[in-house]
Image: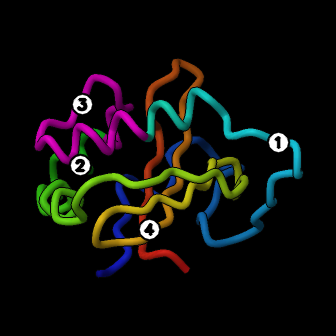
Amino acid sequence: MKAVALAAVLALGAGVASPVLAETPPAADQVAPAREEAALRTVIAQFQAGKPDYDQMEPRLADAVKAQPAVVTMVQGFGALEHVDYVGVVNGAQHFRVGFATAETDWFIALSPAGKIAGLVFRPAA
């Protein structure tokens, strides 16, 4: 499986860069950000159902998802969702380790001020 980037890394502005840099692990008592985890679980479920909700995405991300229909098929091939674990923050994006029946993956998600998904990246777990 190769890394798949949806959108121009994270379409949030100049302060956001590649999700492979500057990871900040969560403190021992830190919990996953609820909005981002809920959005991630929702978008994964939509991909697995073959019906992404483009209205929940910022336009650049929606266009990128539409341009890469194989991404939805790839996520469907991962099998059932088994776990979503919060890892930390990477350049403003929330990093989650997501396990499926047949794949262990790292997902990075960022929400816009409007609460829509502005950035979404996933790759095989490192």
Left or right for 77, reference 11: left
Q: CA distance from mark 2 to mark 1?
A: 31 Å
Closer to the N terminus: mark 1 or mark 4? 1
Circles 1, 3 touching at the beta carbon (< 8 Å): no
Expressed as whole percent of the image width and height from the top left, the position of residue 117 reads 44, 34
Read off the residue under disc 2: 65
Q: Earlier in the sequence, mark 2 or mark 1?
A: 1
- Looking at the rendered structure, the secondary structure element under dot 1 is loop
- Spatial separation of the CA atoms under disc 3 and disc 4: 22 Å
Circle 1: is it few (<14), some (14-19), or many (20+) Cα within 10 Å?
Answer: few
Q: Nearer the viewer, mark 1 or mark 3?
A: 1
Q: Spatial distance from mark 3 to mark 2, Cα to Cα?
A: 8 Å
**Residue under label 3:** 54
- Residue range in magenta is 41-61
Q: What number is the disc on residue 30?
A: 1
The image quadrant of residue 37 is top right
Tell me the distance, in whole angstroms, between the alpha carbons under discs 4 and 2: 18 Å
Amino acid on which the number 3 mark rests in the picture: Tyr
Q: Quadrant of the C terminus?
A: bottom right
Which mark is first along the chain, 3 or 1? 1
* Residue at mark 4: 105
